[in-house]
Amino acid sequence: MGIKLTDLEERDLLTIIASSDMGELKMQAFVKKVLKENVAIIDVIFQDGRKLNFDNVQINIEYAPEDGVPFIWRAARIVNVKNQYVLQVAGEGVRHNRRSCFRVSVGVYARMAMVGRQGTDVMIRDVSLSGFSIADRDRELALEIGHELTVVFSDLGYNLKLVGKVVRIEEMENMIVYGVETRNLCKDLSPYISIKQQRNRRNKEKR
């Protein structure tokens, strides 16, 4: 079952996924006013106060309800009308499996923080625009579904901070893998993934 813009309420949070040949950028926006089932006025949250022109880019809009399974409108449009951003979508938003996002192998240590626990070092196994996974070879983390955590790590000149919630636990022969759904907007994540992918490819070719 899909969702219409008229099913949303004022101040509901949306994620704008804008992509072009230059890469992908994610930013957030609030619903300001829904005009009809496929048109709404939105307040876009820009990084560093810089505004963008949404012409000539592909735009997908994501909305995550309380049950955590997001909806997505593909091939949306955002136009500036009298200094207001107007969102136009085609049809209903459909359920979107974030695990289908491209993942890149990472293999670096991060500092993990959780409420009520001391900080600890963890291994980031892979990362995508929608989430990341932690490899627990010592089987000592004892994370559970729903646990919220923050990881901070540096790699390839990027300092990344990801906030997320554990949504998957996979028991493997030599480790436990925790799948974490990212809940914050990290502006450096997309370029990092792109460069990491290129670096991994070159390293593989050298073998």
Image: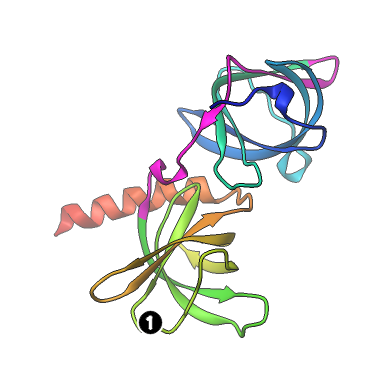
Residue shown at 36% from the left, 52% from the top: 104
- In this figure, which residue is indicated by the disc labeled 1? 139
Display colour scheme: rainbow
Q: Position of residue 78 (x, y in %)?
A: 67, 20
What span is colored magenta in the figure? 81-104
Q: In the displayed structure, would residue 40 be above or below residue 70?
A: above
Q: Position of residue 17 (x, y in %)?
A: 57, 34
Which is nearer the eye, 169 or 180?
A: 169
Q: In the displayed structure, would residue 159 be above or below residue 64?
A: below
Q: Residues within 10 Å of mark 1 (few under 14, many from 20)?
A: few
Q: Residue furthest right?
A: 82
Which is nearer the eye, 119 or 160?
A: 119
Q: Position of residue 138 (x, y in %)?
A: 36, 84
Under mark 1, the amino acid is Arg
Would you identify the image quadrant in which residue 37 lies? top right
Q: Residue furthest left?
A: 207
Q: Is residue 174 left or right of residue 186?
A: left
Numbered-mark total: 1
Magenta highlight on residue 94? yes
Magenta highlight on residue 63? no
Q: In the displayed structure, would residue 72 be above or below residue 156?
A: above
Image quarter where the C terminus lies is bottom left
Q: Is residue 127 left or right of residue 31?
A: left
Q: Is residue 156 visible?
A: no
Residue shown at 56% from the left, 61% from the top: 165
Residue shown at 33% from the left, 48% from the top: 198
Q: Position of residue 88 (x, y in %)?
A: 67, 16
Q: Is residue 197 visible?
A: yes
Mark 1 secondary-structure assignment = loop
Q: Is residue 28 left or right of residue 81?
A: left
Residue shown at 73% from the left, 36% from the top: 29
Q: Is residue 202 left or right of residue 157?
A: left
